[in-house]
Image (cartoon, helix red, strand yellow):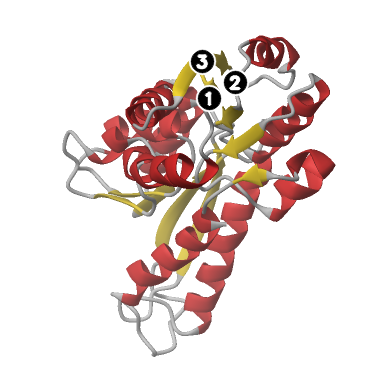
Amino acid sequence: MRFFNGIFTGLALLFSLVWTSHAWSQSKPPVRIAAINPLSGAGAFDGQLALEGMQAMVAIINAQGGVLGGRPLELLTYDDKGTPEEGVSAAKRAMEQDKVDLLVGGWFSAVALGQKEVTRDKIIHIVTSSQHPKVTEEGHKWLFRLNATSTMMSERYSKFICEHIKPKSVAFITISDDYGRLEYENYARLLSACGIQIKGNEYYNRTDNEFTTALTKIKSMGADAVYVSAINTSQGASIYRQLKQVGHRGSVIASAGNMNPKLVELSGASIEGVYSVS
């Protein structure tokens, strides 16, 4: 839930800087905002929830008189389909064709990393849930992020795993992209430092919905705990269900910030006992 609340709060803080209580006139041009989210594909539930939060915030601000002396907000919606290619294409279209004033996007790290190269120093770019630290590195004077980085999260979460869950060994399943590789690298290093044996890692792709082969390999590693780096709700639920189906009976640790009511609903009984932090 951290991600969704963060989007709502972040937009509220941003627009409060230019808030006005005066009624806005229809003659004043709107402030055009590009909302780029995964509205189809594996991340559709998460992207739709983010969009609904943005729409609610825009409605509240417009009802209070708009911004910048009475200009209404106009939200333009784009579907990045959870892929860097579509995310970059949407950002270019928003900037070059639709002439937006502000861009909100980058739900997934791979998408955000691609988009920042298009928006760099050209437009205000607010990144929503992406955790990869490189998103806010390498220079971009108009880019802001609403979420902590995966490096920040791993330092605190690994301490909890070491001191409270205390598995003797851990195996990982992470997405095959920059974020997933960094996630494995960070936790493998930090958990090894407190004496936990790292059994290995299996990668999955953004479009996968069948994880049995990877999870069977993980089960054969004989780890006490499995760390699941699920970047969206539908894939996360599938992994938790299939992990139980292949016979894993040890601890399950969910990556930081990836728990929400829909995930609990879709996972069913397989979510019982899963450790999570948000």
Disc 2 target residue: 223
- Residue 132 in the image: x percent, y percent? 36, 35
- Residue 102 in the image: x percent, y percent? 35, 54
Q: Where, quadrant-wise, is the N terminus in this rendering?
A: bottom right
Q: Nearer the viewer, residue 109 or 253?
A: 253
Kindly indicate whether the residue at mark 3 contacts the one at mark 2 (C-beta within 8 angstroms): yes
Specify the farthest residue to the bottom. 22
Real-space Cα distance between discs 2 and 3?
A: 6 Å
Q: Residues within 10 Å of mark 3 (few under 14, many from 20)?
A: some
Q: Residues within 10 Å of mark 2 (few under 14, many from 20)?
A: many
- Residue 40 in the image: x percent, y percent? 67, 35
Disc 3 target residue: 199
Kindly indicate whether the residue at mark 1 contacts the one at mark 2 (C-beta within 8 angstroms): yes
Q: Residue at x 60, y 29 (%)?
A: 225
Give the amino acid type for the residue marked by disc 3 in the picture. Lys
Q: Is residue 41 left or right of residue 83?
A: right
Q: Earlier in the sequence, mark 1 or mark 3?
A: 1
Judged from the image, the secondary structure of the residue bearing numbered disc 2 is loop
Q: Is residue 30 visible?
A: no
Q: Residues within 10 Å of mark 1 (few under 14, many from 20)?
A: many
Q: Earlier in the sequence, mark 2 or mark 3?
A: 3
Kindly indicate whether the residue at mark 3 contacts the one at mark 1 (C-beta within 8 angstroms): yes
Q: Residue at x 54, y 32 (%)?
A: 167
User: Vertically, is 141 above or below 169?
Assistant: below
Give the amino acid type for the residue marked by disc 2 in the picture. Ala
Give the amino acid type for the residue marked by disc 1 in the picture. Val
Q: Nearer the viewer, residue 227 or 67?
A: 227
Q: Earlier in the sequence, mark 2 or mark 1?
A: 1
Disc 1 target residue: 170
